[in-house]
Amino acid sequence: MTTIRKITDLLGSEALWLLEHQCTLISKESLELPAPDYLEKVFINSNRNPQVLRSLAQLFGHGNLGDSGYLSILPVDQGIEHSAAFSFYKNPEYFKPGNIVRLAIEAGCNGVASTFGVLALNARKYAHKIPFIVKINHNELLTYPNKHDQVIFGKVREAWNLGAIAVGATIYFGSKESNRQLQEIAEAFAQAHELGMATILWCYTRNDAFKTEEQDYHSAADLTGQANHLGVTIQADIIKQKLPSTNYGFRDIQFGKYSKEMYEALTTDHPIDLCRLQVANCYMGQIGLINSGGGSEGGSDLAEAVKTAVINKRAGGMGLILGRKAFQRPMKEGVEIIQHVQQVYLEKEITIA
C-alpha cells in the first residue's frame, strides 16, 4: 500500500475534505513555506548570530525529516505538568530518563525536548547523537489550589553546559502571571541567543474566563493566533501551539480588539483555515509553527495524529511536536506513530492548501 493510500485510509470519511481543501482568504503565495533552504531565506538577514544559525541547522538537519524544512520533535515534560505517576503509569519504563531520549532516537525525530533533570542525566551519552531542547520553565501543579503559572527551573547557561542546541519555554497568555512570564522568557531567550542556542515558545492561553458554558476558547484560532504573535515578538525561533478547535474567542468572550470584518477577511470554520490564521500570526510563516499532537485517547491516537499533521502541513505549518500519543504506549508502537506522522511531511502529494 502506498504512503498516500495509508494516510487517506487513516483520514477516513474526512480524507477529501482535508486533502482537497484550498485556502482562499490567506493565500499560500503570501506565506513563507517550509523548505530545505528555509534557514537561508528567513534567518540569514536576521540578528541571529552564527552560533544560533548552526544550532537551528542541527535541529533542521537531523532525523527522518532532516533537510526537508519540517520538524518532528518528541516532548516529554509531563512528569512535572501532569504528575509523573499519571503520565507514566501506562509505561513505567519512561520513569527512566534514558528511555525518553531513546524513543526520540529510534523514531528519527529532529530533536527531544525535556526537563533539565532528564537531559542532564543523559548529556554525555546522547547530546552528540540527537539535538537537545531544554524546557526551562514548568507549571508544577503540586500547589493547591492549582494556579496558571510557569516558573523557571534552571539557568539558561546550565542548558548550554549540558549540550542543548535550544531552550523551550511556556507562557500562559491571558493568565494573571503572564506579564511576569513574558518578561522572564524574553530575557531568557535573549540569553539563549547570546550563547548560540535557538528558542522555542509554547504559546498557550490560560484563563478561567476563556472557558464558558457553551465553549472552551483556550484553543480558539483568534486567541491562539494572538498568543503566537506575542511569541514571535519576543524572538522565538519556533512557535509551539495547540491545533485550533474553534474561533471567535475575542467576540464571544467580549474582550480585546476584534471586528466582524476581521473574521470574515481572514478565516472560515475549516480546520486548515483556522490553522492558517495561526501560521499568519507567526509573521506569515517566517517563524515556523509546530502544532502539538494532543493527549492520548486510546485507539484513535494514530488517526488523530495523522489528521493533525495533515492540517498543519496543508495550512503552512512546520511540523508536529508529539509526546503523549507516543510515550504512553510500548516503545515500538510509539515509534510507529511518530514515523507515520513524519510520512505526512515527506509525502509530496500532500501539498499546501
Image (cartoon, rainbow, N blue to C red):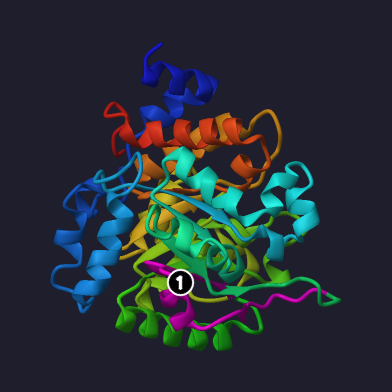
Residue 334 at x, y = what percent?
Answer: 58, 36
User: Residue at 64% of width from left, 84% of height from top?
Assistant: 177
Query: On the rendered structure, is 137 left or right of 241?
Result: right
How many labels, in total? 1
Query: On the rendered structure, is 316 left or right of 186?
Result: left
Q: Determine if the magenta segment contains residue 49.
A: no
Q: Which residue is mark 1?
A: 162
Rate crowding at label 1 as few (under 14), some (14 to 19) or many (20 or more) other CA atoms within 10 Å.
some
Q: Circle 1 sits in a helix, a strand or a loop, which is it?
A: loop
Residue 202 at x, y = what percent?
Answer: 51, 65
Query: Where is residue 210, by image quadrant?
Result: bottom right
Look at the image and tell me whether residue 260 can be seen. Answer: no
Residue 12 at x, y = what percent?
Answer: 53, 20
Query: On the rendered structure, is 33 left or right of 185?
Result: left
Q: Is residue 120 above or below residue 87?
A: below
Between residues 288 and 108, which one lies in front from this camera angle? Answer: 108
- Quadrant in which the N terminus is drawn: top left
User: In this view, which residue lies farthest toward the right?
Assistant: 144
User: Residue at 73% of width from left, 42% of height from top?
Assistant: 91
Between residues 250 and 235, which one lies in front from this camera angle? Answer: 235
- Quadrant in which the C terminus is drawn: top left
Between residues 31 and 171, which one lies in front from this camera angle? Answer: 171
Query: Where is residue 40, by image quadrant?
Result: bottom left
Residue range corresponding to the magenta coloring: 146-173
Between residues 195 and 177, which one lies in front from this camera angle? Answer: 195
Tag 1: amino acid: Leu
